[in-house]
Amino acid sequence: MTMSEQELRLDGNAAAGLLQEVFVHEVTSVRGACARCGAVGEMGAQHLYMTPLSPGAVLRCTSCDSLLIVAVRTGGRLRVGLQGLVWIELPDEGAAS
Amino acid sequence: MSFVSRGFKGRSRDKPRDARVPPGQYVVHDFPVLSAGPTPQPSLDTWTFSIEGEVDETKRWTWAEMRALPSETVTRDIHCVTKWSKLDTTWEGVSVDTLLAGVETAADYVMAFCDGGYTTNLPLEDLTGGKAWIAFAFDGEPLESQHGGPARLLVPHLYFWKSAKWVRGLRLMNEDSPGFWETYGYHMYGDPWLEQRYSGD
Amino acid sequence: MVGTALQRRLIWRTAEVVDLVDETPRVRSLVLAVPGWPGHQAGQHVDVRLTADDGYQTQRSYSIASPQSTDERLTLTIERLDDGEVSPYLARELHAGDQLELRGPIGGYFVWAPALGGPLLLIAGGSGSCPLMAMLRLRQAAGSTVPARLLYSSRSLDEVIYRSELARLVAAGSGLEVMLTLTRAQPPGWTGLHRRIDTEMLQSVAWSPAERPWIFICGPTPLVETAASALVDLGHEPARIKTERFGPTGG
C-alpha cells in the first residue's frame, strides 16, 4: 500500500453526513450486501473515496473494492448510484413499537 | 450567502485575473489529488497500452515500446471540475496523434479505460490534432502514481476528469457512451470555458 | 412520539464559541453553544462549514469530544496542522463569541453507549483520542463499570490530550485502565511503552477474543490499519472492530 492510497481512503462513516442527505436515515450503522462478492457489512465499515475533497462520495466494498454507493452533487441535484448493492437494511419505522 | 466566518480566508487561491482562467475557477499552486478508488500499482513489465474497439486491428504497446516512441514536452493550464485551475503545468508524453497514425477507423468517440476500472468518454476529434497526450512525466519527473502514473491521458482543453489517470487504452466507439463520472451526472463533453460541469449545463 | 423522535434531517446550525481550552501546545478544545442541539451519542461527529468573505466555502468533519448533555453544548478538540486550511483557523483564530456553522450529530457506526456493554478497548493515535474521550466521559457520567482500556499512542507526554482528566478517570476506580506509548520522546525515568503500536503490544493490552471486546480505533491511517489488522490476526471479530481514519485533507 502506498502512502497516497492511505491518504486518500477513509472509513465509510466519514460519509455519514452526505449519506444521511440521501437516505434521510442514518445509514452508516446499517448493513448492506455487495453485488459483486456478496460480502455483508455495515456501510460505515466500507472504504470511502473522494470525500471530503470533492462534492461527492464513492463507497467501495472492503472485501473486493467494487462500488457500493456513489453519491455525486451535480449542480443542485444529488445523483445516487446503487448498482453495487444487492440490498441495504434500514430500520423499520413502520414496525409496531 | 449570508454567513461569513470571521477572519477565515481559506486555501491560498487567486481570483481569476486574466483571460486564461475559465469562469467559476480559482487558481491553485499545489496539485490536489482526487481519486475514486485505490491507487493501482501496475508492473511496468506487464503494462500495455491498447487502441481497440472499432478499428481494423487492435494496436498494443508495451511500456518499453511506448517510451521508445517520439515524445513531446508541453506546457498547459489544467482545470478541475472541483473548481481549481493550475497554470503552466509541464508534461512529457506521446501525442495521441502518434498512436493513431495508421489506425483505420470510422469511429467518432473514444472511451479511455484504466487500471482500477475508471473510464471517461471523449469525441475522437478532441484527441487528435495535437490536443492530447499519453503523459508519463510531470515537471520533468516520472509521473507519481497518485497523479496517474505510470501514465495518464492528458486532454488539457477539457475538464481534468477527462484526463484519465492510470490509462491503459482507448476504445474507439461509433456512438458516444458515458464513462464513470459521466454516468453519475457529469457532462458528456466537459468544456471548462462553457462551464460544462454537469449534464444539462 | 411527537417531540421525542430523533431529528434526522440534517440542518446547518449556527454555533457560538463560548470557551476555548488549550489542551496541548498544538491542540485546542472549542466549547460551543448550539441552540436547538438535539444531543448526540459518544463517537458521533459534526460537519463544520467555513465561509470566506468572497463566498468560498470549505467543510470538515470533527468528532465530538463531550458526552451527551442536555445543555445544548458540545466540545470539539482541534489539532492545529500548520499547513492545514481549516485547523489553524479553528485552533488559533477563533475566539469566544465567534460563530461557526455546523450540522449534526452525524454517524451511527463509530458509537458506543453503556448499553452496548464491553469490555471496551479504545486505541488512539494523536488527536484520534477525541471521539474515544467522548466514550470515556459518557461511561463515567453514566456510572458505567464496563471494563475499559485505552491504549494511546502519542509522540511525547506533552502531546497527550486530556492527560490530567484521564488520570482522574483512572483514579475514580471504575475499571478504566490507560496505557500510554510515547513514540518519539520520553520523559526521564519513563518506564512505560515507547514504541509504535504493534501486535505484541495489542496482545498484552487487548482482552482475549473469547471475551469479545468492542474495539474502537481512531487515528492516522497507518496506525489504524496496523492495529485493526493485528487485532484480526489475534482472533478478534472484524465486526467488533470499528475504525475511524483521519481525513486526507489533514486539517
Image (cartoon, coloured by chain):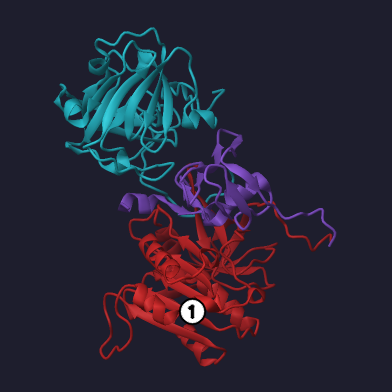
Chain colours: A purple, B cyan, C red
Dot 1, how many residues are within 10 Å of its Cα: few (below 14), some (14-19), or many (20+)?
few
Q: Establish if B28 lies above or below C247.
A: above
Which residue is nearer to you in this view: B38 or B188?
B38
State left or right for residue C224 relative to residue B104: right
Label 1 is placed on what type of residue? Ser
**Res B30 quadrant in image:** top left
How far from the left and from the top, in percent, is residue A1? 32, 53
**Image quadrant of residue C22?**
bottom left
Image point (31%, 28%), residue name:
B153
Q: Which quarter of the rendering shows the C terminus of chain B?
A: top right
Q: Is residue B180 visible?
A: yes
Residue tagged by mark 1?
Answer: C208
In the displayed structure, B67 sits above or below A97; it is: above
Residue C160 makes an appearance in the image: no
Q: Nearer the viewer, residue C228 or C157?
A: C228
**Between A7 and A75, the one nearer to me in the picture:** A7
| Horizontal and vertical percent position of residue C110 | 56, 64
Q: Position of residue C160 (x, y in %)?
A: 39, 77
Q: Residue at x 50, y 28 (%)?
A: B182
Q: Is residue A53 left or right of residue C185?
A: right
Q: In what quadrant of the picture does the N terminus of chain B appear? A: top right
Q: Is residue B186 above or below residue C49?
A: above
Label 1 marks a residue whose chain is: C
Numbered disc 1: secondary structure: loop
